[in-house]
Image: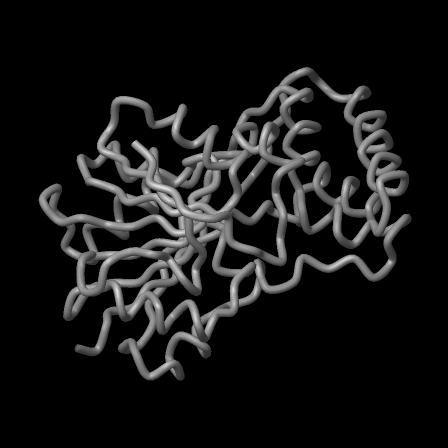
């Protein structure tokens, strides 16, 4: 099911990346389980997934029997997400982190999966506080590749040979300070879960094609495509299945009142 309104304007447009997004690694199931236990979840308590994309996090939440309101501003991403959660307890709608379109005081927990870095975080935290029930929970999370891994280091060097100033920006920054100083939440806590995703080389390439941060900093299609080709050439020399080490990093806090 999807409810819709006019498509909101956002600064990050994932339309051209949408078809590649499902090749990205899932979040650590152990980390998600530990988070839900820490916030005292129950299937009867509705939750929201903001910036839900193609449903990566929504699908994990559904595995725990939760009823999820998934909010995604991008039509292409949301269409795939609806298909990925068809027949499940997920309702999709159009909105952003700063203006979800969801009702006030309606959710026990609100999650941002790899999306808190592409919003105005202060405005988003105010919006989260609005839609949370008293003493509800906010959580944001990202998957970070282990950049100490030799294969990942080589791919990083390929990127930086074309973009010397390349940076992952706020998706690798600790959001604790902005959460703690927002005035809406108690002290932020964190959970981590490391895992290894065994990925066919073709999936690794497809995942890189979904990388909006890389595309932005490449500055042009020609530079971006050249980087992808060079990564593919490097991977051609490796075994068909590649171990990609990740850590899911979660930050969560309880609404003050």
14 displayed left or right of 182: right
18 displayed left or right of 175: right
Q: How many marks?
A: 0
Q: Residue at x 88, y 42 (%)?
A: 223
**Compared with residue 106, is residue 236 higher up or lower down, i.e. above or below?**
above
Q: Residue 13 placed where, x, y %?
A: 63, 48
Q: Residue at x 36, y 73 (%)?
A: 126
**Compared with residue 199, is residue 145 higher up or lower down, i.e. above or below?**
below
Q: Which quadrant would residue 166 be assigned to in this image?
A: bottom right
Q: Residue at x 66, y 49 (%)?
A: 147
Q: Which quadrant would residue 239 be assigned to in this image?
A: top right
Q: Residue at x 80, y 20 (%)?
A: 236
Q: Residue 148 placed where, x, y %?
A: 66, 49
**Compared with residue 208, is residue 140 higher up or lower down, i.e. above or below?**
below
Which quadrant would the N terminus be assigned to in this image? top left
Which quadrant would the C terminus be assigned to in this image? bottom left
Q: Residue 222 placed where, x, y %?
A: 90, 39
138 vs 51, nearest the viewer: 51
83 vs 145, nearest the viewer: 83
Instruction: Name the residue furthest top.
Output: 240
244 vs 222, nearest the viewer: 222
12 displayed left or right of 112: right
């Amino acid at each position: 099911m999807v409810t819709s309104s006019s498509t909101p304007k956002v600064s990050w447009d994932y339309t051209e990346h949408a078809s590649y997004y499902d090749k990205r690694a899932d979040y650590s199931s152990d980390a998600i389980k530990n988070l839900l236990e820490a916030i005292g979840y129950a299937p009867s308590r509705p939750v929201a997934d903001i910036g839900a994309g193609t449903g990566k996090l929504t699908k994990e939440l559904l595995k725990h029997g939760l009823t999820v309101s998934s909010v995604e501003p991008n039509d292409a991403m949301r269409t795939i997400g609806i298909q990925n959660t068809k027949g499940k307890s997920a309702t999709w709608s159009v909105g952003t982190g700063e203006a979800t379109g969801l009702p006030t005081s309606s959710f026990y927990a609100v999650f941002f999966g790899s999306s808190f870095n592409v919003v105005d975080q202060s405005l988003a935290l105010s919006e989260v506080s609005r839609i949370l029930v008293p003493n509800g929970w906010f959580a944001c999370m990202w998957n970070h590749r282990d950049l100490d891994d030799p294969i990942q280091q080589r791919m990083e060097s390929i990127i930086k040979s074309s973009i010397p100033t390349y940076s992952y920006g706020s998706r690798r920054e600790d959001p604790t300070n902005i959460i703690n100083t927002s005035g809406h939440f108690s002290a932020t806590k964190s959970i981590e879960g490391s895992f290894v995703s065994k990925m066919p080389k073709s999936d690794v390439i497809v995942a890189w094609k979904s990388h909006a941060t890389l595309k932005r900093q490449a500055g042009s299609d020609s530079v971006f495509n050249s980087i992808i080709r060079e990564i593919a050439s490097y991977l051609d020399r490796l075994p068909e299945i590649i171990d990609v080490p990740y850590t899911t990093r979660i930050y969560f806090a309880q609404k003050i009142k």
